[in-house]
Amino acid sequence: MTLTDDAAVTELLEQVADLSDHLVFLQRLIPQALALTDEAQATALVREAAALISTPGAALQVGGVWHGDTPGWLRALERPAAPVVLPRGSVHTGAPYTAAWRLTAVLAVPLEDGWLALWGKREFMAVERNLIGTLAQLLDAALRALRQRREAVQYEMQARDRQRAHAVWRAVTPAQLRPPEGYHLTLRSQPASDFGGDFQFQEGEWLVVGDVSGKGLPAAIITAMFASAFTVAARSSDLLSKLSEALYGHLEQSGKFCTLVALQLRPNGQVRVMNVGHPPVLLRRADGTLKEIRASAPPLGTFPLEHVTEELVVLHPGDALLLYSDGLFEAEDARGVPFGLDRTRRLAAESGPETFIERAVSALTPYTVTDDLTLLVLQRDPAVPSVQLHLTGDLARLPEIGAALRTVLAEEHPALMAAELALTELVVNAVRHGQARHLTLRVHQAGAEVLATLTDDGQAFDPRQVAAGTAGELREHGYGLLIVQRCAREWQYARVNHLNRQTLSLGAPAPLSSSPCP
Amino acid sequence: MTRPPITLDISVQRDAEQCCVRLSGRLDAHQVPAFLAAAEPPAPQTVLDLSGVTFIDSSGLAALVRLVRAAQAAGQHLEITHVQDSVRLAMEITGLYGALPVRRAP
């Protein structure tokens, strides 16, 4: 055996030993690669492989990010399309990369989402290239699995986040509201996704129903801001100004706006209605007649809120307010024809307050609702005794006023005498001075008071504008309005559809303040 | 529950010195013209007994004021007696309870 032979055998043995080392390395690599939890561990495996093939430089790039020691010249290299050895001298590692100056070959192997590079040797043998090629395949599988695990975790976190956010949103805009004292309340709140832009809040006598433009999370964030501003604003009688003050800037900055209806519901049936850009509120009287309360101001966030005309209505037992969001009338059928406001009105007139929501939902069956859908019915408790009296211009029928009052009030009710007195004055007034020939009186008891609505077809006349005579003066006229003023806790007048409508809250009159006794 | 009477009954007892007018029923805008038409010429002493009046409105009050003023102008004496709760309420609201010659309950 020659020396050359010996050398050849030695080299062969070394190669076999190297292969054996490679095999051991690969065996160890597989479980490690499978358990990979981050890119740093992948880089460590690349470094280990580099040590095994006795080359000092190793780096890994994943998703455009370098891991390990990465000299500047390496960063300037492109990811190779296939495994390649850049022979020594072909890679410029000189100035400005003087610190890395070395005459070296570079082994570059692409990965699915990056590449790895080894350097620091004059050349890379075929077995070494094979080893690194196998390593690259393993890393690819491991990094892919890592990516998928991360995505799954992220998706799960997002799903859990959404679930939690939905729970928070639902707590902020509850699917159930408590019926205000003296009213029946039915609500259907159906968001288009996990979060809605429709909302409803309740605090004390206040109830607010609204719709933030847009859907999903952005609308829900504004809704949550509304909820917190509302709690504070509801302590003020000027709720809308407070809301606008708190939210206008945020709405404007986020390019959003909001429509809403604010209701202040008093247990006796008196309701303040403020409609800010919302679809018309339908006031449905117990006899099925419908009145619309339209928006009196543009949506919040479009123009600074200056003045909202509020409508004061009295809900007698059985009367109801019907509220709905655009999700109802903008729902479209298969041909793209919207449900429409006319159909909404018809539905409201035809179905009683008890069945409105149920019938609306069933009428929507052939329609696609793409927006949040909110339906709310507030009905004045129909069990409260009430009476309706039709009168003509015949004053011989005046005793019927007292008789009607006595059907809903006990003889000893503190407001009975005052109510009969005041209503008689108003009827006589309407007949004598307004030439009214058809008068309707609706009355119900509200605690110690009596709530009355008198409509008449006489000439337009607001009796509140007339100065009442002085009390205690001996004269032969001018006591009527004095009586009404002293019996009425509240007295409103409106001219609606060619009718005078007065609503009064009547109670036992307070004793005269210091009468001019000698 | 009894329906209030829908008419006004007027009964008069008088002699040379005294006149007692007893009203019962409603003294409202519908009844006042009949009441004033039936009003007796004044006597030196007139008692207006309202014990049977269940309801009075501003027209009824104005009619009472008219009678009281007429008596005052003629230098005669007129007194209103037996004012019921609902009538008293109407008088109090308008400040007439103290201004009219009402005999107070003892």
Image: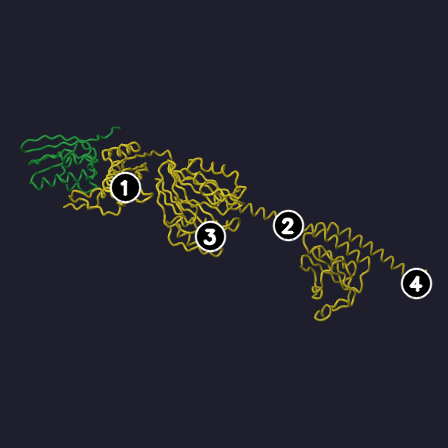
Chain colours: A yellow, B green
Which amino acid type corresponds to the residue marked 3 in the rendered image?
Phe
Query: Where residue A159 sits: x, y (%)?
Result: 58, 46
Residue annotated with mark 2: A151
Q: What percent of the width, then of the height, locates residue A411? A: 26, 32
Relative to A385, residue A92 above or below = below
Q: Chain of mark 2?
A: A
Q: CA distance from mark 4 to mark 2?
A: 60 Å
Q: In terms of secondary structure, where does tag 2 sit?
A: helix
Give the amino acid at mark 1: Gly
Residue carrying label 3: A257
The three-letter amino acid code for the residue at tag 4 is Leu
Q: In front here: A315 or A498?
A: A498
Q: Nearer the viewer, residue A2 or A107?
A: A107
Q: Amino acid at mark 2?
A: Glu
Count the marks: 4
Image position of A304 (left or right of A82): left
Element at badge 1? loop
Q: CA distance from mark 3 to mark 4?
A: 92 Å
Q: Chain of mark 3?
A: A
Label 4 near label 3: C-beta < 8 Å? no
Cα–Cα span, label 2 and label 3 = 35 Å
The dot on residue A458 is 1
State the residue at coordinates (43%, 54%). Answer: A246
In primary-sequence order, the first of circles 3 and 4 is 4
Q: Secondary structure at mark 3?
A: loop
Residue at 75% in and 66% down: A91
Tell me the mark number nearer the camera, choosing from 3 and 1. Answer: 1
Separation of disc 2 and disc 1 at Cα?
75 Å
What chain does badge 4 belong to? A
Between residues B99 and B44, which one lies in front from this camera angle?
A: B44
Query: For mark 4, what is the residue?
Result: A3
- What residue do we see at 24% from left, 29% from top? B3
